[in-house]
Image (cartoon, rainbow, N blue to C red):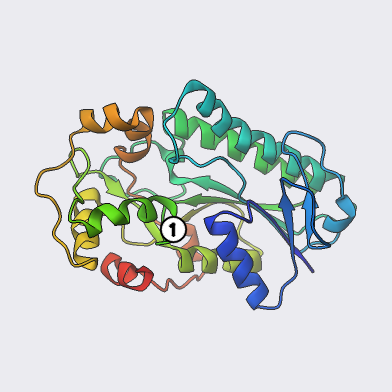
Amino acid sequence: MAIIVTGASGLLGTALTEALRAEGREVVRLVRRPARGPGEVSWRPGERLSGLDALEGAEAAVHLAGASIGDRRWSEAYKRELVTSRVDSTRTLVGALRELSSPPEVLLSASGVDFYGDTGDREIDESAGKGAGFLADLCGRWEGEAVRAEEAGVRTVLLRSGLVLSKRGGALGRVLPLFRMGLGAPLGSGRQYWSWITVADWVGAVLHLIREREVRGPVNLTSPSPVTNTEFTRTLAKAVGRSAMPIPVPAFALSLGLGEFARAGLLPSHRVLPGRLADSGYRFAHTRLDAALSAVL
């Protein structure tokens, strides 16, 4: 049975698709251009999905589509795109799944630890409620569309991902050149917690959650060892053989340079633990940041 993947050309979608194909699994990619073969279905998020025959009887759907959070400064127009690219695409996909006579057994829909808002130094798991702020509200709306798949009998898992470590892209990929030049520095107070996970563990967790039929609802995709931004900075600098800058980048300077994204995406603290993932029996490949960065780099 096939695995349906949206956002398959992104960092995580590419890694997941490669892993599935390495296992000999069939992948059906939902793409925003004309389909180029039987393994693709063209779609436009926000419009009714055609080509439903290719989705019938699929084993799982993994929904990763959405505009990048940190690729550009947030204008009001781009904030609307961040919302619509997630909410509308999820509504479209779930609507299509509800039309199928044989829908996938499980929908795994992307979300983020931003759901919890700024949690300070408190350790939290999936039992914590939604926090405040633009990203928390975005995650809430995003997840609200995804869980409608349960009405069609589709087990739904909400993938609340932390900072994904990859040298190919994402936040780590963007800051690596600075750290390799010896320009890495803590951000703001440096006391805010960052919850992280390697791409290998992210993919491994998704494959695990496809198989674990008793798991549904929110699942934190983070390592068991969140660290402060200061510790992250020092560990990354050491991993590339350089020293971190002794003076942190002030919060006001980050806000001037990056706007609202700095205040909402870089400075809040997320000390998030993978409670449900651990309880379901997943075994992490990387639990220590230093070893994880060595593996990634």
Position of the N terminus by quadrant: bottom right
Residue 8's image quarter?
Answer: bottom right
Question: How packed is label 1: few (under 14 Cα within 10 Å), some, or many (20 or more)?
Answer: some
The residue that appears at 23% across and 51% down in the rendered structure is 228
Does any portion of residue 212 appear in the rendered image? no
Position of the C terminus by quadrant: bottom left
Q: Residue furthest top?
A: 76
Q: Report which residue position mark 1 lands on.
A: 275
Residue 222's image quarter?
Answer: bottom left
Q: Nearer the viewer, residue 254 or 188?
A: 254
Q: Nearer the viewer, residue 7 or 110?
A: 7
How many callouts does the rendering have? 1
Left or right of 287, for residue 137:
right
The residue that appears at 77% across and 66% down in the rendered structure is 2
Kind of residue at disc 1: Gly
Q: Nearer the viewer, residue 249 or 265?
A: 249
Residue 47's image quarter?
Answer: top right
The residue that appears at 36% across and 62% down in the rendered structure is 224
Residue 132: x percent and y percent? Answer: 41, 29
The residue that appears at 24% across and 49% down in the rendered structure is 229
Residue 205: x percent and y percent? Answer: 53, 65
Left or right of 89, for residue 186:
left
